[in-house]
Amino acid sequence: MCLQAAWYHTYDALAAPRPARTTVLRRRLYALSVRLRWHPYWTRTAAVPAARAELRRQGRQLRTLEGAR
């Protein structure tokens, strides 16, 4: 879930108006995407759409909780 939350955080930073360091943010987003896609969890579990949707939901929830601190 932390990887997914980091992905959302990076995506939000890149989507902000006139973001600084866009190349760094794009590279980080790409690296996080690769890590999420090839995480060992998906070799043990069927990569069904519902499981990936749940991961995204929990990642958004974690991002929201981190932002409230």
Image: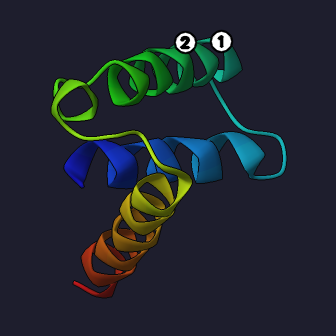
Q: Amino acid at mark 1?
A: Thr
Question: Which residue carries the number 2 mark?
Answer: 27
Type of amino acid at the residue the image marks with label 2: Arg
- Residue 50, percent from left and from top: 49, 63
Give the label, 1 or 2, closer to the camera.
2
Which of 50 and 20 lies nearest the eye of the viewer?
Answer: 50
Q: Position of residue 9 (x, y in %)?
A: 47, 52
Q: Give percent across and percent down for residue 52.
A: 45, 52
**Nearest to the observer: residue 20 or residue 63:** 63
Q: State which quadrant residue 59 falls in.
A: bottom left
Q: Is residue 25 above or below residue 41?
A: above
The number of callouts visible is 2
Image disc number at residue 23: 1
Q: Is residue 1 above or below residue 25?
A: below
Crowd tier of the residue under label 2, counting other residues whose Cα lies within 10 Å: few below 14, some 14–19, many 20 or above = few
Residue 68, compared with residue 23, is above or below; it is: below
In whole angstroms, how far apart are the C-alphas of marks 1 and 2? 6 Å
Q: Residue at x 83, y 41 (%)?
A: 18
